[in-house]
Amino acid sequence: MDSLPSHIQSKLQEMFAQFDLKEQYANLSNLYKTNKANPRLTEQMGIAYARGRMPATFSVIKNVLQKFYEKGLHFDSVLDIGAGPGTLKLALSEEVQYSAIEQSESMLKIFQTLHGNKNNVAKTSLQKFIKQQNYDAVFASYVINEIENKESCIKKIFELSSKYIFIIEPGTPVGFQNILLAKKIAPKYNAKVIMPCSVTENCPINSGDWCHFSVRLPRIFEHQLIKSGKLSYEDEKFCFVIFAKDSADEFVNSTVVKKPIKKKGHVIFDVCKQGKIERIVVPTKKLEKEISWGDTLEIKQ
Ligand SMILES: C[S@@+](CC[C@H](N)C(=O)[O-])C[C@H]1O[C@@H](n2cnc3c(N)ncnc32)[C@H](O)[C@@H]1O
């Protein structure tokens, strides 16, 4: 389970001490529930985001990056769109050249409190941003849903990236619709899906259901307080997609798209196998390691 670095947790605790977090977190949740574009966050709501949501978005980003690195892939430079409190920056190694854009003054202040002033963060919207350099990868983590002109903004994201495009959204039907929209646009930029599946067009999960995954993270005390939760952990549901431009490679051919059902002597997997959803029953002895929701299904021959 991934947690935020301890120096960031201490800074957040200091920032928190100044107001009623529970109330601010409730305001933030109500704002997000409306799914409205351009939600206006106050600085207090931004701090509540950093404390209440960032631990989860950090764990999701770590999980997505791990899947990417496990395939032997990497990028040297990245543009983080809608950086918020700088969640992606915390999940990356220092070697990656990090740049970001963020349109909200409140979020920018929180970013600077957490990371210092010497970061390459521009205060601008994606719509107004003018590219300064090449970026191997462009990240849009929990931001598409907040954007008004989704189609033109997703096109701009594809234009800004030289190679990889990462899109992460909440694990909801609305979040998945944003992923499908990006898949529809990708072929215009000669980009194809490399994770979590290899299906750019004709996704088999396109009505009623939604393709999403889950990551478990520890709940810390203040987090339990503001979210009124009792468990020592929480499961964060998310949707994601990684595209590569001008790539002939395939990295995944069967992805576990639901929580596996463990039975005595066998496990039932629902997999997306090159554009088809299949239910596969595998004897436990044919599994070399534990296969979880979101993993590639590998069976011993
Ligand atoms: C939900 S937060 C996500 C923060 C961070 N990426 C994460 O994963 O934790 C969305 C952020 O995107 C910013 N944002 C929304 N629309 C934007 C736009 N059009 N251009 C730049 N930033 C934007 C918001 O101000 C907010 O800080």
Image (cartoon, rainbow, N blue to C red):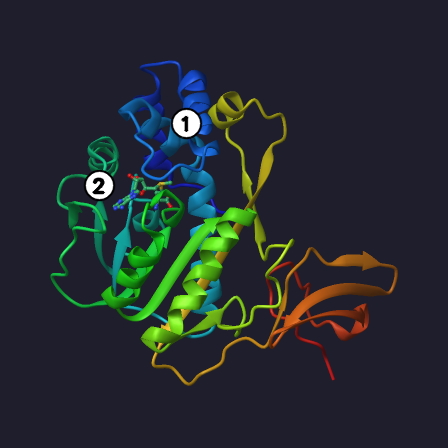
Which structural element holds mark 2?
loop
**Whole-percent x, y for residue 50 in the image:** 36, 33
Ligand 1, by image quadrant, is top left
The residue that mark 1 highlights is 28
Say if 117 sits above or below 261 in the image.
Answer: above
Q: Position of residue 104 (x, y in %)?
A: 23, 36
Q: Amino acid at mark 1?
A: Leu
Corner quadrant of residue 246? bottom left
Where residue 147 sits in the image (x, y, percent)? 33, 46
Residue 5 in percent (x, y) is at 38, 41
Could you tell me if the residues under marks 2 and 1 are in contact, i.e. CB atoms within 8 Å?
no
Residue under label 2, please give it.
103
Q: Nearer the viewer, residue 48 or 140?
A: 140
When the figure is inspected, residue 92 is found, relative to residue 76, above or below; the finding is above
Tell me how many marks there are.
2
Tell me how far mark 2 sits from mark 1, CA to CA.
Answer: 17 Å
Dot 2 beta carbon under 8 Å from ligand 1: yes
Q: Secondary structure at mark 1?
A: helix
Q: Can residue 278 be spotted in the picture? A: yes
